[in-house]
Image (cartoon, rainbow, N blue to C red):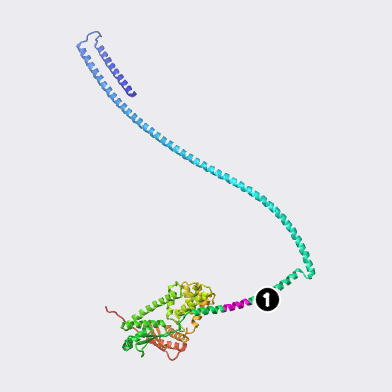
Amino acid sequence: MIGVLVALVVVVLVAIVALALVVLRLLRAGSRTGIEPGARPSSVPDADAAAALRAAQAEAVAHAETVARERATAVAREHAEATSREQAQALARKLAEADRERAEVARREAHEERDKAMAELRGRRAELREWDSRLTQREARIEERLATLEDQTRRIESRDRELADRDASLARRARDAEELDARRVAALEQAAGMTSAEAKTELLSVVEHHARLEAAALAREIEARAEDEAQDRARRIVTIAIQRVAAEQTAESVVSVLHLPGDEMKGRIIGREGRNIRAFESVTGVNVLIDDTPEAVLLSCFDPVRREVGRITLSALVADGRIHPQRIEEEYERAQREVEERCVRAGKDALVEVGIGEMHPELVVLLGRLRYRTSYGQNVLGHLVESAHLAGLMAAELRLPAVIAKRGTLLHDLGKALTHEVEGSHALVGAEIARRYGEHEDVVHAIEAHHNEVEPRSVEAVLTQAADAISGGRPGARRESLESYVRRLERIEQIAAERPGVERVFAMQAGREVRVMVVPEEVDDSAARLLARDVARQIEDELTYPGQIRVTVVRETRAIETAK
């Protein structure tokens, strides 16, 4: 507002100055025309004066307009300045308000920080007061303990003084006793005529002599009683085990009888010109004996596994009615698989019968193979089961766990399933197989020690030996002649099988004939004759046998094509 008033004052002053200038110009013009002040002007001068007046008026108007414009400009400028000042003032007010708000926020934050600091300070003061209280209590307890320790120390010092006094008194008494003993010993030595050392030595020698005599007599008595009791108990244990085991008599044979639906089936078994029977014997290695027995044929072979495979093969052929070489080979392969399954089943049945839980599957297979093995005419698997029962009974009588004894005894002849395939005795071979398949070391030791090839070191090993001897030595268990016969036939086959180019070997006709199948690509006709002669000569040099043994080398070539 002050600025506007100043502008108006300036405009009025400018207008007054302009009017003063106009009047001054008019006065100057009148003086130039010579008109006196009281005289009446003429028309010409009046015209000039009017013109000058108009000019002055026009100039004054123009100047007034200029002044008005300047005033308007000044007013506008003043208004703009006022607007700018108002905006500046508004901005200043906003900035002031923002500053006040920030100051307020800062003030609140300062208050909050102060409150937090005060709270933290109060918390720390409380902690310090708590720690101070704890330290005060701990100092009080320490002072109490110190007082107690000082009291105990005073009591201990007092006790030490008492003990020192007692020790001194005891030392005086000990010296008095030693002096008294010395005087007493001197009196005794003077009365006995010997020193105390000599008397002690003599007394000890007499006591030692009597003690040795009594100890020797007692030891002999204990040993005799122990031997008598051990023998009586061993007889009782073995007798109880034998009485409780029910075993069958050995009835093994090398001949199987196959019943036929009719005698006309014998001709079909023989075939045209004996083709079928030769093919059957060549494939299976089992002799077919066709005699006058009605509706029956005999199968002869020293190997019970091979004889069983031949029996199953011939039974299937007779039941089917189609008998020819190709059919014989098919049924032979099927019979082999069936016998293997029976072996596995026999092994599992043996485990169940003996009462043994888990066992490695390979050991079960090897154990089942012994179903068709014989030892001196005794079935090996039956012998193992019988021996395991005996070992378990004797272990129970001895108050021993029967698991190890049964397991070791059941597996002690396991090597007989592979003796002809692996070098070494069946005891060591079986022990190595059992160790390979994770059996306990006590079981392995019982297997390897049952023929004293390894010194027995455990009760289970001794029980295995005893059970093996009882099972094999009972009346009717074994036949020595059958075992010798089987061993001779196995050796005959082994001699021929060791030759190069030999595919299969069969001992037939109760060992009177050896049929050797060779690979035709490796052995020609001349080599076949030489092979037959060498095998016959080695059999003559190594074996003892009645009669003669014929060696037949078969070299067969087949050409097979399929019509599509």
**Is residue 516 visible in the rendered structure shown here?**
yes
> 70 and 269: which one is in front?
269
Looking at the image, the residue that sits furthest to the bottom is: 547
Find out whether residue 227 is within the magenta segment. Answer: yes
Report the residue marked by disc 1: 213
Q: Residue at x 22, y 15 (%)?
A: 50
Q: Amino acid at mark 1?
A: Leu
* Spot occupied by residue 90 in the image (x, y as percentages of width and height): 35, 31
Q: Is residue 21 left or right of residue 541?
A: left
Q: Main secondary structure of the magenta part?
A: helix
Q: Quadrant of the N terminus?
A: top left
- Specify the segment rendered in magenta: 221-231
In this view, 373 is above or below 103: below
* Spot occupied by residue 196 in the image (x, y as percentages of width and height): 75, 68
Q: Is residue 259 left or right of residue 387?
A: left
Q: Quadrant of the C terminus?
A: bottom left
Looking at the image, the residue that sits furthest to the left is: 43
* Location of residue 259 (image quadrant): bottom left
Q: Is residue 257 left or right of residue 433?
A: left
* Location of residue 30 (image quadrant): top left
Find out whether residue 98 is within the magenta segment. Answer: no
> 19 and 342: which one is in front?
342
Neighbours of disc 1 within 10 Å: few (<14), some (14-19), many (20+): few
* Spot occupied by residue 389 in the image (x, y as percentages of width and height): 48, 77
Mark 1, secondary structure of its residue? helix
**Is residue 418 visible in the rendered structure shown here?**
no
* Location of residue 271 (image quadrant): bottom left
In this view, 439 is above or below 75: below
